[in-house]
Image (cartoon, rainbow, N blue to C red):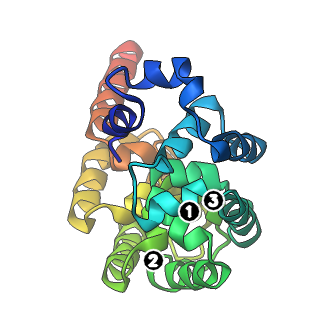
């Protein structure tokens, strides 16, 4: 979501500065919404961004739910109760559209079932809060997207040489859940690049657990390779 553009639309050309200086522009619901977001884990910046989602220029259903304090409270309750203690503010800050799922308990339960059955074919325990806060797109993804995520998980397990009940697989997905939304071929290629760097680790799986973000971030992989090269030169 382009928050800078939203700032301009909602608060004028001063953008975020206008937010800080324009208290006189606030609507009746904003103070109550801000208090709710802050009480449910948001910091000041996230709370303001979430309020922007409900600014009157946004006339779609997403804008409506972010202007309704009762709905915001329901989103927070459903996220915490149905998603292992997840924070609605973290989910909606990354993907406001996910609020449409969180505000409906039945739809939220259905989304959890679909994500677990299609995208997460692992047999071990998994902290769903970490997964959906890091990859909230999963909550409103279609079945094809979730099935592709499941394929990526299986490729990840095969490449790491672990079974689906290996707790390290869950740790990787909790640390870097955007792996689930990455192209399977890209994930496989990234793991191939990382394999030579893991020689001094007990196993490749353990190495990826410690460097899970590098699977989807090429800059992290480059930095990791440089670090490992420097360590090798020091040993020599």
Which residue is disc 2 drawn over?
Answer: 119
Secondary structure, mark 1, is: helix
CA–CA distance in space, label 3 to label 2 = 32 Å
The first of marks 1 and 2 along the sequence is 1
Which residue is disc 1 drawn over?
Answer: 65
Depth check, front residue: 64 or 190: 64
Secondary structure, mark 3, is: loop
Is disc 3 in contact with disc 1, using a CB cutoff of under 8 Å?
A: yes
Which residue is disc 3 drawn over?
Answer: 68
Characterize the local packing of mark 1: few (<14), some (14-19) or many (20 or more) Cα atoms within 10 angstroms: many
CA–CA distance in space, label 3 to label 1 = 5 Å
Depth check, front residue: 123 or 180: 180
Depth check, front residue: 127 or 12: 12
Q: Of discs 3 and 2, which sits in the foreground?
A: 3
Q: Quadrant of residue 199?
A: top left
Residue at point 34%, 78% (across, down): 151
Where's residue 43, x and y in %? Answer: 66, 33
């Amino acid at each position: 979501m382009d928050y800078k553009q939203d700032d301009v639309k909602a608060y004028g050309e001063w953008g975020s500065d206008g937010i800080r200086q324009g208290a006189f522009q606030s609507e009746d619901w904003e103070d109550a919404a801000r208090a709710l977001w802050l009480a449910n884990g948001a910091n000041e910046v996230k709370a303001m961004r979430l309020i922007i989602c409900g600014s009157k220029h946004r006339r779609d259903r997403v804008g409506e739910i972010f202007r309704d304090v009762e709905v915001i409270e329901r989103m927070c309750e459903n996220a915490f109760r149905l998603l292992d203690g997840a924070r609605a503010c973290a989910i909606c800050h990354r993907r406001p559209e996910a609020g449409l799922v969180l505000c409906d308990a039945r739809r939220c339960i259905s989304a959890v079932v679909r994500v677990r059955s299609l995208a997460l074919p692992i047999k071990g325990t998994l902290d769903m809060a970490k997964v959906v806060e890091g990859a909230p797109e999963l909550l409103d993804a279609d079945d094809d997207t979730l099935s592709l995520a499941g394929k990526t998980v299986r490729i990840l397990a095969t490449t790491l040489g672990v079974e689906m009940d290996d707790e390290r697989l869950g740790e990787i997905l909790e640390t870097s859940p955007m792996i689930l939304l990455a192209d399977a071929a890209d994930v496989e290629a990234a793991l191939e690049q990382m394999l030579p760097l893991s020689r001094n680790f007990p196993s490749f799986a353990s190495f990826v657990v410690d460097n899970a973000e590098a699977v989807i971030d090429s800059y992290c992989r480059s930095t990791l390779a440089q670090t490992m090269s420097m360590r090798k030169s020091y040993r020599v």
